[in-house]
Structures are given as structure tokens and as C-alpha cells.
Image: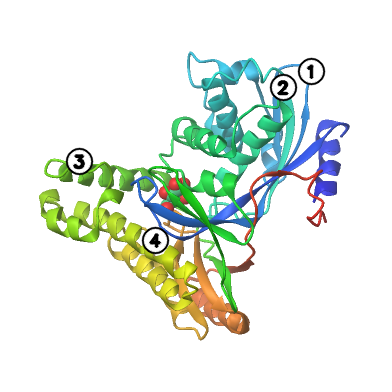
Amino acid sequence: MKNIMMKWFKNIYGDNDDVRVYFAPGRVNLIGEHTDYNGGHVLPCALELGTYGAVRLRNDKVIRLYSMNYIEKGVIISSLDEISSTEELIYHRKDDWANYPKGVLWAFAQHSFMDIINRGMDILYYGDIPNGAGLSSSASIEVLTAYIIKEMFRIDISLKEISLLCQYAENKYVGVNCGIMDQFAIAMGKKDHAIFLNTDTLEYEYTPLNLGNNRIVIVNSNKRRELGDSKYNERRAECDEALRRLQTVVNKKTLGDFTIDEFERYKSIINDDTLIRRARHAVYENQRTINAMKSLQADDMVEFGELMMESHISLKNDYEVTGLHLDTLYESAIRQEGVIGARMTGAGFGGCTVNIVDVSHIDSFINNVGKEYEKITSLKADFYVAESGTGPKNLQYANNRVLY
Ligand code: GLA
């Protein structure tokens, strides 16, 4: 990939002297969905799929951005001066995907790094994460960009701080009130491990992905998220409102602070069926995630799989973020031989499911689920037997990686 990037860099930007190539992964969330903005736990892992960035510093303050995934958009041009102008937030919808890297630069500017970031850059991106599928292609671009800036300007900022900076960019520049899970999982990813993260305190623990004879199979519904961002913000507001009502009778900081018993005791104070269901998902999903971590540590994949299925049902009935496409993939998956667990993953409203499948049944799983899904939805699903991956890296030094 590195060589392909170098060739493209030359085509787009004239020559490729002094170019460096970096990589940041995507992520898949195993369990703990819509808990990260409720102070709960999540259990994602980084993937081998991800985003590559080839970069070179310039002698002026111009920023040029190009994506091999969006060649029709051409080179998108900005400048450090434009991005760091604090008087107004300059957001051009037409810049489309480039608003992610621009947002990251803007976030650096907002945190007073512009005396260090004093030269422009030409950057070329390429990603192999299916986009809009709930595998965090946008957070991958963000973390990659922040990592590139850290390295190119030798900025003393930790990977954890990078994840917070990228979340800030997404919240304040792009306008999606996402939690910390995606950026954290990508920045902190560790091969063959999942990350058990407390999103309230940012305390985390790596746990080995001992899946035994099983593999993680990701299925992309190829149903793009519709109104995903506005519905996402709506769910978040509903949880905030449910918490606000609960706080009139009980002293808790987040929905993640409630045990199931406490929630059942106080829930009537919310006094609205929809809000109760949203909060119930957040509270129960947090407990499921804590239990899922324990079952992973105890090598109890059967228990882990059951928790995944409970998670899907709760996301369907209480949180209402699944829909025909994800439900069809789920229903079909759980009927297949060798399936230990299945659920939607990511924000929902389209995107992917994540499945734990016995390795000897993967072929029949792909065949049967693919056929049933197409029959019901007229769409073809894509299947990925996922490999877990590591956080951002400079590919010059990644000698243990096959640079095809
Ligand atoms: C998106 C957001 C995350 C998280 C998930 C749902 O991926 O970016 O912060 O809220 O949805 O779990």
C-alpha cells in the first residue's frame, strides 16, 4: 500500500520526495453500544482495516488534502490561517470528507498549538474501511491526521490526548455529539486485544481476544445510514433528559452510575415511556458490557454471545436504532450453525453487524446469511473475517507489517 500511496502522491502533488506514510485503524465494537455518552463501559477492538496517509510538509501555510476514495472531489485546498481563525468557525459542507482532517487541525488551533504547527502540508488519504458502515472510517481519518501532525511537528501529546482532541473536532467542528469510544479505540488499539473502557473516567484495560475456534465476522448491510447524525444527537438528548429527571430524586452523575436495581426503583420518575426505554437500554447495556468483559476473561464465549444477542434486542426494542436491514442480518445470523453471538455494531440506522462464528462454519454462514439477506432486502451484504489491529503508526518503521 505504501508504494501505491507514493505513486499517487507523485501524480497528484508533482513529486514524492520526503514523503512519509502513516496508518490508523478502524474499529469494531463488540458490545457496549450507545453507552459512551452515558458514562458507561464499551468493549471495542481496533481492526486491520484502516486509513493510510502520505504526507509532506510545505514551505508555506497552504493545506492540500486529497482522498483516493473520493477522486471526484479533487484536491481540497485550505490554509493554516483559515483553519486557525478563531473569530468564526469556517465549515464548508462542500469539503465533505475533508472536514474531518480540517476539523482536527482546527481542534489543534483551538488548543493553542499553532505556534508549533507553522508549516502547511500536502496529504493524500486512502481508506479500506467501508464508509458509513459503523466501523469508524471518519474517526480513523481524524486520529490518523492528529497522529501525522504529532509526528511531523514533534508535538508532545499522548495517544489518549489525541483521542480527546479528535472527539472535540467531531463534536464541535463536524457537529456530531459522539462519545469517546471510536477515537479512543483507534488511538489505543492493540493487536489481539479488546479495550474495556470506562467512558466516564477513561480508565481502561486490555483483554486478550481469546476467541478459541471462533472468528469475528463483520457483515456490512450496505444500507447507508440515513439521518444517522440527527437521530444520533436525538438519542443523546433523550438520555440526557431521562437522566435530568432521575437526578431530581437521586444523586447520580451519569446513567452509567445506575445499577439495574437502582434504575428499576427510580425509573417511574422519568414519566415518559420513550425516555424510560432509552435510559433502560443505557443502564442494562452498561451492565451487559461489564459482564461481557468478565466472560471474555473467563473464556466463556457462550455467555459472551448471549450478551451480544441481548444487546441487539435492546437496541432494537428500547433504543430503536436497528431497522429492517440490521434486524434481517441478525435474525438470519442467529439461526445459523456455529454462530455464538451476533448484534448490530456502531451507531445503527444501517451499517454493520458483528458476529462470533465458529471457524468451520464461516463459509456456510456467509452463504446462507448472504442469500437470505438479499432475498428480503434486495441488497447484497459484504462479509469480512476481521483481524484485530494496532493503533496509529509510521509505516517507515513498521517492518513487521506486510507493505503490499
Ligand atoms: C458512534 C459514535 C460513538 C458511539 C457509537 C454507539 O460510533 O461515534 O461515540 O456512541 O456510535 O455506541
**x and y, in percent, of residue 373 in the image:** 50, 74
- Which residue is under mark 3? 244
Q: Are marks 2 and 1 in contact (CB under 8 Å)?
A: yes
**404 relative position to 224: left or right:** right
SS label for mark 2: loop
Residue 380 at least partly seen: no
Q: Which mark is residue 120?
A: 2
Where in the figure is residue 308, as x and y percent of width and height? Answer: 41, 69
Q: Which residue is mark 4?
A: 289
Quick one: label 4 or label 1, which is nearer the N terminus? 1
- Point out the tag, 3 or 2, that comes first from the N-terminus: 2
Amino acid bearing label 4: Thr
Q: Quadrant of residue 83?
A: top right
Mark 2–mark 4 distance (CA, rounded to whole Å)? 43 Å
Q: Nearer the viewer, mark 4 or mark 3?
A: 4
Three-letter code for the amino acid on which mark 2 is drawn: Gly
Q: Within 8 Å of ligand 1, the CB of disc 1?
A: no
Residue at 58% x, 76% y is 212
- For the residue labelled by badge 1, is the local secondary structure a helix, a strand or a loop? loop
- Compared across the picture, whether 246 is left or right of 334 comes to left
The CA distance from mark 2 to mark 1 is 7 Å
- Which residue is the site of mark 1? 59
Q: Position of residue 5 (x, y in %)?
A: 80, 44
Residue 4 coordinates in the image, percent (x, y): 83, 48
